[in-house]
Image (cartoon, rainbow, N blue to C red):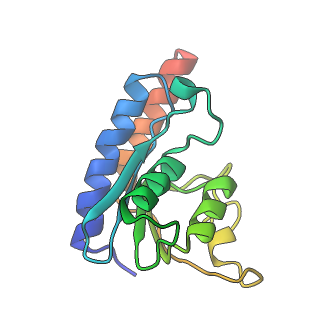
Amino acid sequence: MTPLAADLDAMRRALVLAGEAAAEGDVPVGAVVLGPDGRVLGEGRNLRERTGDPTAHAEVVALRCAADALGSWHLADCTLVVTLEPCVMCAGAVLQARVPRVVFGSWDAKAGAAGSMYDVLRDRRLPYRVEVVGGVAEEEASALLRAFFEDRRGD
């Protein structure tokens, strides 16, 4: 499946959010939740370092924001757009929120749960499955992550 124009616009915004996270010392991941009409319902960036909250991943922050905007945890017909493949925790949050579609940039071979390390989002043993579109703006998303970790290691 190919990304839609709204996905690409949301990914551009998610990349900006990821850059903001990096500027504050958090892993550069940004996320945007789109409603069925393509309107932004919520956005987030990694805030773990800033808040000390281990669940403050960009996806969780964006899902909470979207749920608040809708007045409901049930995010049916929404799309989560995120710069990095969701981890197991974030994939679980996507399933709990009933988000039917996830679009992401960079694959995460070490902790990804949308097809690389695990495939939680499409696991047929679970009651909900998600459409996954990976590799959208992958070069830009990967470059942010690479620069962040090279800077941390002093490469």
Find residue 109 and report its horizontal and vertical position in percent: 64, 53
| Tally of marks | 0
Report x, y in % for residue 94: 57, 65
Asked whether residue 105 is in view, the answer is: no
Q: Which of 74 and 57 is in front in this view?
A: 74
Q: Is residue 119 left or right of residue 34?
A: right
**Extreme residue toward the front, this view:** 71
Task: Give the residue furthest to the top.
Answer: 154
Image quadrant where one finds the N terminus: bottom left
Residue at 42%, 22% in the rendered image: 24
Camera sees residue 47: yes
Q: Where is residue 60 in the image (x, y as percent from the top left)?
A: 54, 51
Q: Which of 106 and 98 is in front in this view?
A: 98
Q: Which residue: 46% across, 28% down?
A: 148
Residue occupying image coordinates x 51% and y 72%: 74
Residue 78, quarter of picture:
bottom left
